[in-house]
Image (spheres, rainbow, N blue to C red):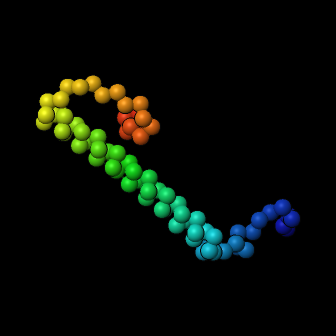
Amino acid sequence: MTFAATYSYSDRRISDLKTLVEAIRFIIINLILAFIFLFLTLEEIDWAIFSDRKKITDKIIDHTSWNIKTLF
């Protein structure tokens, strides 16, 4: 007994082109975001090492949207 409003999963192809494009798009977007966060983290680590070596005691006020401390 089937109803007109039900969806049969056996009729849907899992490996169609639309699903493949969406998966590739998802992966690419997440790779771009991962690289951005990687370089943000490296910049923070670089500044911490540099300021420690040079004994810089300046207070840093950073209200930008890409500051890693405000993102987390």
How many dots with numbers? Answer: 0
Residue 18 location (% of width, % of height): 63, 70
Q: Which residue is nearer to you in this view: 53 or 8?
A: 53
Residue at (29%, 40%) from the top-left corner? 44
Q: Which residue is nearer to you in this view: 2 or 15?
A: 15
Quadrant that contains the N terminus: bottom right
- Residue 31 left/right relative to 26: left
Q: Which residue is nearer to you in this view: 27 or 40?
A: 40
Residue 32 location (% of width, % of height): 44, 56
Quadrant that contains the C terminus: top left
Residue 25 can be seen, yes or no: yes
Residue 72 can be seen, yes or no: no
Residue at (29%, 44%) from the top-left corner? 43
- Quarter holding residue 3: bottom right
Against 17, residue 48 (above or below) is above
- Quarter holding residue 60: top left
Residue at (70%, 69%) from the top-left corner? 9
Residue 42 location (% of width, % of height): 28, 47
- Residue 12 left/right relative to 38: right
Residue at (77%, 65%) from the top-left corner? 7
Against 25, residue 68 (above or below) is above
